[in-house]
Image (cartoon, rainbow, N blue to C red):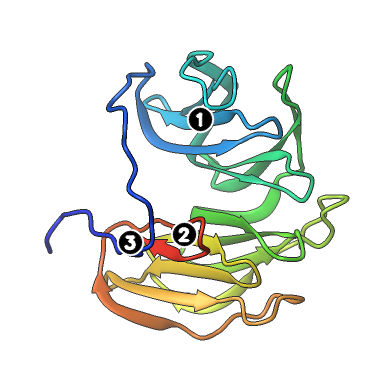
Amino acid sequence: MKSVIEGHVSSKTPQLNWNGQMPLGGKAKQIATAQDQNGCQHIFYVGLNNHIYQNIQLEPNGVLWSGETPFSNLKANEVTLVQDANAALNLFYIGTDHHIHQHILVDPVHNQWSEAPVLNVLAATMAVARDSFEKLNIVYVATYAGLFHMRQIDPATNEWPTDGTTFGDVGPRQVCMTDLANVLMLVYINGTHDLVRRFKSSADDDSWSGPSEFGAKARQVASAVDALGVPHIF
């Protein structure tokens, strides 16, 4: 299998200029980034020692950063970031205990976070996105390779189901998820490296469409939506 990065970009997408590589310090196994309520970018990553580290943009669109800071004494296998219904930044991570943990940024000025109860599932990898009803959705690969999903019951209280619901797929290797305004798109790599997509078929419940293959194979996948609402898969 060839190991190259491929992507499909809309012809209407504007061409962008890039400022080149800028070292931020620190070394990482895995990384995630998103904006907080004030428009500042946060970077979270799993260090080589499996500890979680954070680096914060000091002002929106700025080039100065706070520098590497340990987030806690906890260790993780994977981190991801998403904004919730209140635009508050949420950190989800899979601990070295394989449970999914959640922290919510309650005060971006002072970088104060609340800690939510640990979700009662065991995961190897995951993706998180917010749907059109402002509810957070988690899709995860269980430690025994089954594909599951969980949908937040109440965004106001951050209540979650006690367990995940299976898709029936076995052996997925990596997942990503994108909000397409009225529907969530799940893209994942199955056990034979095929690129597969599913859609959240009903906006007001947790039902999903069946799997549909792209006809391509991959080792890793990421997705996003551009300013025109066009989804991009890399």
Q: Label 3: how many residues lie within 10 Å, few (<14), some (14-19) or many (20+)? A: few
* Residue 78, disc: none
Q: Quadrant of residue 175?
A: bottom left
Q: CA distance from mark 1 to mark 3?
A: 25 Å
Which secondary structure, mark 3? loop
Nearer to us: label 1 or label 3: 3
Which secondary structure, mark 1? strand
Residue 62: x and y in percent read 51, 21
Residue toward you, 58 or 110: 58
Q: Which residue is mark 3?
A: 9
Q: Residue furthest right?
A: 157
Q: Quadrant of residue 129?
A: bottom right
Q: Which residue is mark 2?
A: 176
Q: Residue at x 75, y 34 (%)?
A: 115
Between disc 1 and disc 3, whose residue precedes?
Answer: 3
Q: Residue at x 22, y 54 (%)?
A: 5
Between disc 2 and disc 3, whose residue precedes?
Answer: 3
Q: Label 2: how many residues lie within 10 Å, few (<14), some (14-19) or many (20+)? A: many
* Quadrant for the C terminus in the image: bottom left
Residue toward you, 96 or 58: 58
